[in-house]
Amino acid sequence: MSSLKIKRVVFKASRALAVIFTVTVVVPVYLASWQDTTQKPIGTPKVAQTVDTTPKIVNDVDQSTSDPPQSRTVWGLLQDDSRISTFAHWVGQFDDIVGGLDTPQARFTLFAPTNEAFAQESFEHGLPWFYWKFLVGYHMGPGNSSAAALRTQNTVQSFVNADIFFKYKQRISVQTVDPGHDGDDDEKEITLNRHSTVIVPDQKAINGYVHLVDRVLFLPESTTHILRSHDEFATFREALTKTVDLAVLVNDTSTHIGQTIFAPTEAAFAKLGRKANQFFFGTGGEDYLRALLAYHIVANQTLFSDVYFQEDGRGQLPVDTDSQIVLPSLITDQGLNITVQPAKGPGHRQSVQVNSRVPLAIPDLVAMDGVVHGIDTILVPPAVDSDKDQDDESSGSQNRPWLSRFFDWSAGTAEETLTVDQWIERLQPLVGELRV
């Protein structure tokens, strides 16, 4: 791993720890939060550990396994497998984590990097203990998820906190090979965060599963880094740089506590056509481009394709076919309607659409400060009725349904069918309506 990446990760961990050590009243909350999920409160390394190590028990996530009972705990399995001895070494530095993993009544899912996975990375000497604790904690989570269960999950929970309220845990995204791949469902390859592949699944312990992976899972990077490191978002990045205030809101982690970015890909901008792109990126188009981009950004709320982190730590909600979620974009009164398509069958997973017509082409790019979803279609804001501010007595508006007097959701409107004049008409009422 490069020196620059190490410094970024240490900075992220240091920032989280700064909250812990400087806001002393929050420390017990943090410890209790870790205890509820790992069966052990987070503490310092062996030389300074002073916390209670009494294990807590969590419920199973997947109890459908038919495997016979095992005699080893997850910790015992880690110790006995020479292929993952490096990972076991770092886990073993923290008695509180070891105690949890060695509790038979608990349930865990671990993603254990092989020794070869660690050998592929370059770690600087003398990294602080909390760096390793956060790294270890990001490779494990509560519940009993077999490989079969993972193939139906969009994300899984880790033990690393994802917000300053200590309400949410950072996610790990799960991918499988294309559903059209020939072969049985149980042959689909599982990858994590589009980076690490499960190479030895379903190492069964008495209290969970260990899955061996071929790469180390590093703590998520910022939204800025994700957008910068994916070529699919090159035009979106350029658009943000032309709208400086939006770029600050997206890139400066101090301006939001979680966020959801529906990032148009190169394919999405190509659908706009040459003339529309020339308008948005040319002289006089900046205000309209800002309004369009703002409709793709949700501040202080993080929506993964299966879990929703509400604003201000108000709680975590599942995202499923029963969900009715409207996310507030940065454009005043212009929400994003989220619908869920059910799984097509065993071994498949649910999918999310925005405004009933735009699927997530690249879902669940996990960020330190939220999530990015790549979309191959530009989201078109609803048409705002130009007469909405006029007196109800004028133009017979009192005879129109309330909702239609304000919005025409135009679910069937395709962005590629809009001319430059139509874009101007659609976006003009939204210029200057930024929600900050």
Image (cartoon, rainbow, N blue to C red):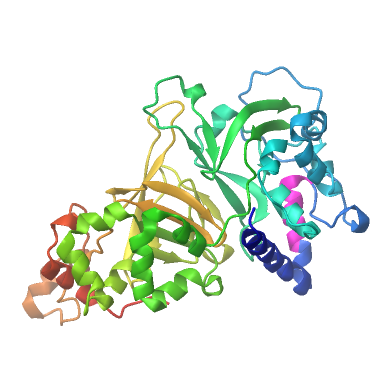
Q: Main secondary structure of the magenta part?
A: helix
Relative side of 384 to 193, left or right: left
Residue 33 image point, x, y percent: 72, 55
Looking at the image, residue 290 lies above or below residue 34: below
Q: How many marks?
A: 0
Q: Is residue 134 within the magenta segment?
A: no
Residue that appears at 90% across and 52% down: 46
The location of residue 212, given as percent across then percent down, is 66, 33
Nearest the viewer among 233 and 22 is: 233
Q: Is residue 102 visible?
A: yes
Residue at image position (42%, 60%) is: 261
The quarter holding residue 322 reads top left
Residue range of the region highlighted in magenta in the rendering: 29-39
Farthest right residue in view: 47
Q: Nearer the viewer, residue 277 or 430?
A: 277
Task: Give residue 417's quadrant in the image.
Answer: bottom left
Front residue (pair 136, 161):
136
Quadrant for the C terminus in the image? bottom left
Q: Is residue 173 above or below residue 134?
A: above
Residue 111 placement: quadrant: top right
Q: Is residue 264 left or right of residue 391?
A: right
Q: Residue at x 75, y 67 (%)?
A: 20
Residue 294 visible in image = no
In the image, farthest residue toward the left: 395
In percent of width and height, residue 375 lies at 34, 52
**Residue at (17% x, 59% y) in the render:** 273
Say if 368 sits above or below 193 in the image. Answer: below
Q: Tell me: residue 349, above or below residue 55.
A: above
Residue 344, image x and y in percent? 37, 30
Left or right position of 334 against 101:
left
